Amino acid sequence: MGKRGKYFTDEEFACKCGCGKADVSSDLVNRLDQLREDIGRPITIASGFRCDKHNASEGGVSGSAHTLGLAVDIKISSGQERFEVLAKVLRGFLFKRIGVAKTFIHVDIDESKPQTVVWTY
Ligand SMILES: [Zn+2]
Ligand SMILES: [Zn+2]
């Protein structure tokens, strides 16, 4: 089990289609380490790297930051958890692109896309 950053493993970032690709940027991992540190307990990566094939089958937008290794979805189980993750993500602009869904929060560092945005699904 390959370690990725301080708190994560390759497996947590790997594409869920079974191809096993986990090609996420080190900047992304560093920010997630910081987020994990700020929260003070484990966070669950619901979706990390996605190959083009898997992204398409999941209905992801073409060119999604997931396919570039610049995004993760963090699993969210309660309103308290959503508040906590959002508070830490926004602190110091740790992430400037945030998508809020019912069961996860998407964060990405894709600088080719609009910055300082929060969207819903
Ligand atoms: Zn894949
Ligand atoms: Zn996402």
Image (cartoon, rainbow, N blue to C red):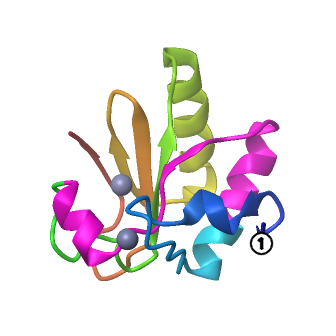
Is 44 displayed left or right of 55 in the figure? right
Q: Residue at the spot x=80%, y=49% of the render? A: 37
- Ligand 1 within 8 angstroms of badge 1 C-beta: no
Callout 1: few (<14), some (14-19), or many (20+) C-alpha neighbours within 10 Å?
Answer: few
Q: Residue at the spot x=43%, y=42% of the render? A: 105
Magenta segment range?
Answer: 31-58
- Name the quadrant containing residue 114: bottom left
Taking the view exactly as shown, the residue that stands out farthest to the front is 18
Is 26 displayed left or right of 118 in the figure? right
Residue 6 makes an appearance in the image: yes
x, y percent for residue 71: 44, 65
- Tell me, yes or no, whether the highlighted magenta stretch contains residue 47: yes
Residue 60 makes an appearance in the image: no
x, y percent for residue 35: 69, 51
Q: Residue at the spot x=39%, y=30% of the render? A: 103
x, y percent for residue 120: 24, 39
Q: Quadrant of the N terminus?
A: bottom right
Taking the view exactly as shown, the residue that stands out farthest to the top is 79
Circle 1 SS class: loop
Q: Quadrant of ligand 2?
A: bottom left
Seen in the picture, residue 120 relative to 82 is either above or below; the reply is below
